Image (cartoon, rainbow, N blue to C red):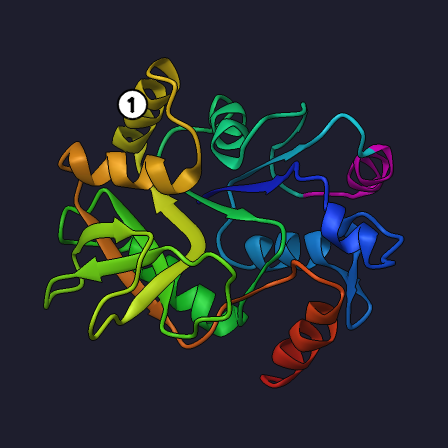
Amino acid sequence: MNYAIIAAGEGSRLAQEGVALPKPLVNLNGTPMIKRLIDIFMRCNATSLSIIVNEEMHQVREYLESLEIPVPFRLIVKSTPSSMHSFYEVSRHFEEGKFCLTTVDTIFHEDEFRKYIEAFENDTTGADGYMAVTSFIDDEKPLYIDTDSDLNITAFKDEAWDRVKFISGGIYGLTPPALRVLEECMTNGVSRMRNYQRALVDAGLKLKAFPFEKIVDVDHAGDIATAEAFVMSRK
């Protein structure tokens, strides 16, 4: 599995709230967030790893360059206007085949992630992608997901509706056809990951929703302790 991490955000909210470290290096129970993700990926059949950081993240860049990563590793240093643009930059370095992309502050339990990757790798339905979803809503601007009874994704919505089940978990398992849609989005001036996901549906790609019990993000200083407790709840 090709893995990619978007770590190009400025983390301005954390800095404003007194967190000195860049977001990727914020410790969760003694381990930097980005290292936790890398370790999990390496234990989940990683064949390559691509990471993008912005041009101001000298500390993060030096940390990543100090690591010994046992698969082909590509570090892209570029400031971008959105996570979708960051995705485009890392996508140009993917090996052939399926890939899994996430942002650096997406926190999940490894056992659930492993089941997700195994389902994606062994898919027999012809799906073009597996999107992590959760019914746990603790996001300032969640992206709501509508599915049919077989968990095929039918729509991505900004607003909730009656009997809404899922929001996006920020983990994207995709196949090469999704990169063609990404190219079209870049050409047409589309921005934001949620609009890219809508474009995938509009293009007729088959996307499966894979439910996680809970996925949390670290956007504020207070989220760090919440994330630490969440990670430790499975220990």
**Image point 58% across, 84% down: which residue?**
234
- In x, y percent, where is residue 126? 14, 46
- In x, y percent, where is residue 129? 28, 46
Callout 1, which amino acid?
A: Arg
Name the foreground residue: 16 vs 38. Answer: 16
Quarter of image, res 48: top right
Using residue 170 as the reference point, say whether residue 220 is left or right of it.
right
**Image point 49% across, 68% down: which residue?**
215
Quarter of image, res 189: top left
Q: Which residues are magenta?
A: 58-69
Total numbered labels placed on residues in the image = 1
Using residue 41 as the reference point, say whether residue 79 is left or right of it.
right
- In x, y percent, where is residue 17? 82, 59
Q: Residues within 10 Å of mark 1 (few under 14, many from 20)?
A: few
Q: Predominant secondary structure in magenta?
A: helix
Name the foreground residue: 76 vs 26. Answer: 26
Q: Quadrant of the N terminus?
A: top left
Q: Quadrant of the C terminus?
A: bottom right
Name the foreground residue: 23 vs 68. Answer: 23
Outermost top residue: 187
Q: Is residue 110 above or below residue 26?
A: below
**Image point 89% across, 53% down: which residue?**
20
Can residue 24 be spotted in the picture?
no
Task: List the residue tagged with mark 1.
Answer: 180
Outermost left residue: 149
Whether 183 is among the magenta residues is no
